[in-house]
Amino acid sequence: MNAYRLAAPALALASALAAWAAATPAFKAGLFDPPRQAPDFSLEGTDGHELRMSRYRGKVVLLAFGYSSCTAVCPVTLATLAAARRELGPLAADVQVVYVTVDPERDVPARLQAFLHAFDASFVGGTGTAAQLAGVRKDYGISAQKITTPDGYAYSHSSFTYLIDRGGRIRALMPYGHAPSDYVNDLKILLKE
């Protein structure tokens, strides 16, 4: 009888925890555990203002790196992020996409803005000097290698997207190739916090 009295509360607790875990949505992206503060930076924004991560405190930020002359990965990433924002409906007002170029030679603010606005007019890009952008890439663990091509040059670069919460903490990292619905899942979790 004593064994039953001891086991019953443990079983009830285990059952409650299992039910809670099943009801709690899980992230699709890889989590940062513990989360870390997103490094701040200062770049020239495509919206005519200084681009700083701290400017978006209070919003959930999707931070990606790429360049406007990219013909493969970058357009797919931006189309995916735009589709996710559309799926969020009114909740998208609390989500900001920030896109930092890896190509300071070609991606002047006007060109980068035109590229981003082809996907979603709310997207904000950042550009700067080669040294400024290298510093931001280093802070975020982004690799970018310039490659000579018959047409000039291209970049091989990291293609994941950071998910940053309202408090400016990096919470997750979404690898390239995930569907908009995976972003929507994770954004809804972050927006509820």
Image: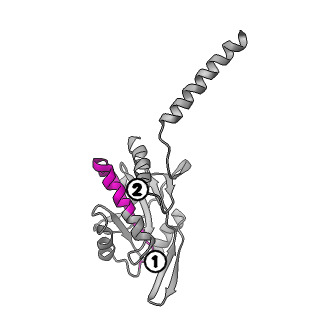
Q: For residue 83, which quarter of the picture?
A: bottom left
Q: Which amino acid does label 1 sit on?
A: Ala
Q: Where does label 2 land, which residue?
A: 180
Outermost residue on the bottom side: it is: 150
Q: Does the magenta stretch include residue 11?
A: no
Circle 2: is it few (<14), some (14-19), or many (20+) Cα within 10 Å? some
Spatial CA span between label 2 and label 1: 31 Å
Q: Does the magenta stretch include residue 91?
A: yes
State the residue at coordinates (27%, 48%): 90
Query: What kind of secondary structure does the magenta stretch mostly adopt?
Result: helix
| Disc nearest the viewer among 2 and 1 | 2
State the residue at coordinates (51%, 52%): 29
Residue 79 versus residue 182 in the image, above or below: below
- Residue 153's x, y, as percent? 47, 85
Image mark for residue 165: none
Q: Where does label 1 land, which residue?
A: 130
Quarter holding the C terminus? Answer: top left
Is tag 2's residue or tag 1's residue first in the polypeptide sequence?
Answer: 1
- Residue 12's x, y, as percent? 59, 21
Circle 1: is it few (<14), some (14-19), or many (20+) Cα within 10 Å? few
Q: Which amino acid does label 2 sit on?
A: Pro
Range covered by the magenta-colored residues: 80-104
State the residue at coordinates (31%, 66%): 119
Secondary structure beneath dot 1 equals: helix
Secondary structure beneath dot 2 equals: helix
